[in-house]
Amino acid sequence: MNQGSADPEPESKEPLRYLSKLEAAAIETELLTDYRFGRQQLVETWGHACAVAVAKAFPLSSLSKKQPTVLVVCGPEQNGAIGLVCARHLHIFDFTVQCEKMDIPFLSYLPTEVQLINDAYNLVIDAILGPETDLSPEKEPYGSILLTLKQVKIPMASVDIPSGWDVEEASADGIRPEVLISLTAPKKCTVAFTGRHFLAGRFLPYDIQKKYELNLPQYFGTDCLTQL
Amino acid sequence: MLGLRALVGIGVLVTSQGARALSKKTSCPLLGGSITPHLECPRRLLSMAQPIKYLGQEEAQRIDEELFTEYQFSVDQLMELAGLSCATAIVRTYPLDSLVKRKPSVLVVCGPGNNGGDGLVCARHLKLFGYEPSIIYPKRPNKPLFQNLVVQCEKMDIPFLSEMPSEAEVIDEAYNLVVDAIFGFSFQGAVREPFSSILATLRKITVPIASVDIPSGWDVEKGSPDGLQPDLLISLTAPKKAATHFRGRYHFLGGRFVPAALEKKYQLNLPPYPGTDCVLQLT
């Protein structure tokens, strides 16, 4: 159990809070200004936790292809940065990752052949668009990338929210990942998510949890993520 | 079904950078020449063949330098991972239910440099893991990195003591263990106040000491026979030569961020970390 004797947060019987876009942005701003976390610090923490979640959901021994290959698709903003950190840690965890730096190959474009993706990789990490992005489904190249991903048959894990989804409302015809790794707290659009749902963001100070009434579930031992 | 090799050959899947990297991954010095992609990544086999390397001071400094310049890591990125490793190792060694005092209290003593920064991060994670750290941070660098770490701790209700208790008995009475995050691998020369008094007090306490990277006050390569004798040592990145003189019960490796190329360049021969753990118990 991770609760110390003077832990201010009592056993939470209240339901878990799902955040709106504004709330998610407000919490992040508070972490950066009032709590003086560095952006790089947060991105590192989130990316690391995502990698741990991926390794938990898709253990090396469970992968069907001969090489433990993972495709990480990174978008232009913070979600993409988190994807890059996740990729780095996945590489340390002995996955064969497609991304940049540390001798990991970077795809300069996404193969539009869905069959190629299905054949070459065991799973796809979607780190394209996060709640901070202003949604514009026609924005290239992400529009066609999302279209490709929708048809992919291998498992997909999304970082924070499935890319292309509205932050507050589940998307009827968007991508459908098997695994979702919510960061800090889950967003409104994930209320009815039926796949495997992890929560990462154990660094969150208790004061913020209380202020926004997040009612976060317990993390066990030293785990940086928990399953919802 | 198209295999990876076939896709590389087609030239569709990866950029030329990618092809180079792929071939790097599939050639193995142990097995000689290029091998088919069907074999397991040889890194684990390689590290088991040679003993782990103990770094000299200059080597440790060069590796650090390379991580920040060539590999473009930021100090706070690595410090966060290092501090997390320290906290995790402490939890493994002294789990909450093993602590004898009424409260899970821990004293974290932070020095004037990066080792102190590691200590601040460690304290924050210990708090999240259910411990009650108190911090002593007498000499604070005037840099945003450290100032921010202090605010993060304060906002987590982690108290900063105004001064170190001078009586070893007071520390023994109040705390279950002490985290020594005073001096790291850059330490050289004489110890200035207030740290020489602090170290003198720590040498007299009976509760366990967990040292971050190097037992403070020790020569980074030769150790120190009458210096601090920690119970737990958490070596970061790779152990330093001083660790060969470590006589405590527990030695962990932490700071799981070393890129494979860097590990190979310095022949660190790091043993594999278990699963996704950020620490590895060496003894």
Image (spheres, rainbow, N blue to C red):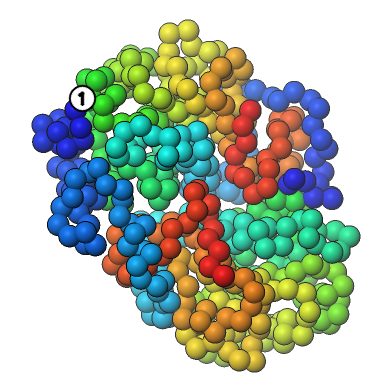
Tell me the crowding category of disc 1: few under 14, some 14 to 19, or many 20 or more residues within 10 angstroms, Cα based. Answer: few
Q: Position of residue B163 (x, y in %)?
A: 78, 74
**Residue named by callout 1:** B1
Q: In this picture, is B152 found above or below A47? A: below
* Quadrant of res B150: bottom right
Q: In front: A123, or B145?
A: A123
Please tell me how many numbered marks the rendered image carries: 1
Residue appearing at x 69%, y 24% in the figure: A17
Q: In this picture, is B160 found above or below B124? A: below
Q: In front: A151, or B126?
A: A151
* Quadrant of res A76: top left
Residue appearing at x 16%, y 32% in the figure: B7
Q: Position of residue A142 (x, y in %)?
A: 32, 22
Q: In this picture, is A41 found above or below B10? A: below
Q: Quadrant of the C terminus of chain B?
A: bottom right
Residue A172 in sight: yes
Q: Position of residue B220 (x, y in %)?
A: 50, 83
Q: Position of residue B243 (x, y in %)?
A: 52, 79
Residue appearing at x 64%, y 88% in the figure: B227
Q: In front: B110, or A73?
A: A73
Left of B169 or right of it: where is A119? left
Left of B120 or right of it: where is B73? left
As drawn, which residue projects farthest toward the top? A172
Q: Chain of mark 1?
A: B
Residue appearing at x 80%, y 40% in the figure: A9
Q: Which SS class for mark 1?
A: loop
* Quadrant of res A137: top left
Q: In this picture, is B201 found above or below A207? A: below
Residue B61 in sight: no
Q: Quadrant of the N terminus of chain B?
A: top left
Name the residue type under label 1: Met
